[in-house]
Image: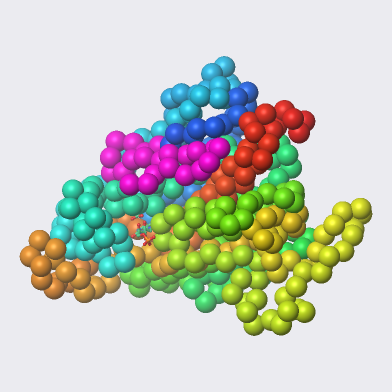
Amino acid sequence: MSSSFGHKFKITIFGESHGKAIGVVLDGLPPGIKLDMEFIKSEMARRSPGKSSLSTARSEADEVEILSGYFNGMTTGAPLCGIIFNRNVRSEDYSAIRNLMRPSHADYTAFIKYDGFYDYRGGGHFSGRITAPLVFAGAIAKQILSTQNIAVGSHIKSIHNIEDKSFDYVNLKAETLESLRYLALPVLDKDAGEKMEKCILNAKEEKDSVGGVIEAAVVNLEAGLGSPFFDSVESRLAHILFSIPAVKGVEFGAGFDITKMRGFKANDEFVIENGKIRTSTNNSGGIAGGITNGMPIIFRVAVKPTPSISLPQKTVDISKFEESSICIKGRHDPCIVPRAVPVVEAAASVVILDFLLERYGEKWIQWKN
Ligand SMILES: Cc1cc2nc3c(=O)[nH]c(=O)nc-3n(C[C@H](O)[C@H](O)[C@H](O)COP(=O)(O)O)c2cc1C
Ligand SMILES: C=C(O[C@@H]1CC(C(=O)O)=C[C@@H](OP(=O)(O)O)[C@H]1O)C(=O)O
């Protein structure tokens, strides 16, 4: 397995959805950071399951217990381990479908790779639940970034065929990102949000699911982070974003649409504003040559419809090697997107902090202040 990520700020996640606990070890955290526990709790709550009819009915408090690396209210610089106990498992949901491979979940691929020994209950280590420790890591990274005025945030760009407005790629402000944090469905256009909610509830009613797109941004980030070739900012962000279960696409700036523009429209022209070099458009999404250019980093993440649905589907019975059908009973998200929003932000925060620690070392914060 490959459950570790990062260079200077390394995270290692562990656990299974129906095991005793899930968690993360954070290595490379600067010492002397006073953790804002209320902020961490609020980030965990944005993702935690069972809080609304738009989510899985499995209800988990997702309180994090810190086991190490934290002393007298400050990070020590030693590995910080945070664990979350699984409280509300219902493994019998999985006994009946033990040998029936859920279409588009990880059952079949995990069965092949781990010779049938993997923990299949609740998706095991493949579960979206394993993003809870990622959100914990991201909340700490986000808090550190905010001391330097760097903000990471996102909104739901679309659910199924319902579209929200786009961010203002050039003049996006930290306050806009902050205001989105408090919305159950973080959207810029309230009407679109109401339609999205109906769309999700409609799919749920019909025992089906829907997907969507999350548009995220990092603002107030300096120019000069990232290294070509293989450690470009796009490469590292895409790596962690594609690690999130159910993510099927990532694009930056104008993304695939840039292919429909001619060079003159696609190019971001340079200007000087208030003594700073900026660009008048931001089709590059704040990255050129794999390096940040000081404009907002903009990216979008495509999230597929939840694979576990209760409509009857064709599958195979792996124990008999014969075709069969499956009707999944259990507690599943009718749409993953709303709960994936803080996960995407967490993932981006981890990467940006890693780049900054790489550039300036762990004394970066003291040095900047
Ligand atoms: C926050 C979150 C919640 C998820 N909830 C569910 C769920 O309730 N049911 C389900 O079948 N898949 C859910 N998933 C997606 C599966 O974990 C994922 O599709 C599966 O592991 C296969 O991985 P892949 O889609 O990346 O190929 C969720 C993912 C995330 C990030
Ligand atoms: C528990 C969470 O989401 C789970 C993610 C998930 C999956 O297959 O990814 C399947 C469901 O698990 P269970 O069948 O145990 O209820 C979701 O509830 C969580 O995100 O914390």
Who's the residue at 77% across and 63% down the image? 170
Pick the residue in front: 342 or 218: 218
Q: In this view, does 194 lie to the left or right of 283?
A: left
Q: Is residue 58 left or right of residue 270?
A: left
Q: Can residue 170 be seen in this view?
A: yes
**Residue 140 at x, y percent in the picture:** 57, 37
Who's the residue at 41% across and 57% down the image? 245
Q: How many labels does the image show?
A: 0
Pick the residue in front: 197 or 103: 103
Q: Is residue 7 part of the magenta span, yes or no?
A: yes
Who's the residue at 74% across and 48% down the image? 222
**Residue 149 at x, y percent in the picture:** 74, 42
**Residue furthest front as drawn:** 229
Q: Is residue 167 visible?
A: no
Range of residues picked out in magenta: 1-23
Compared to 149, does 57 lie above or below? below
Q: Is residue 84 part of the magenta span, yes or no?
A: no
Compared to 139, does 175 lie above or below? below
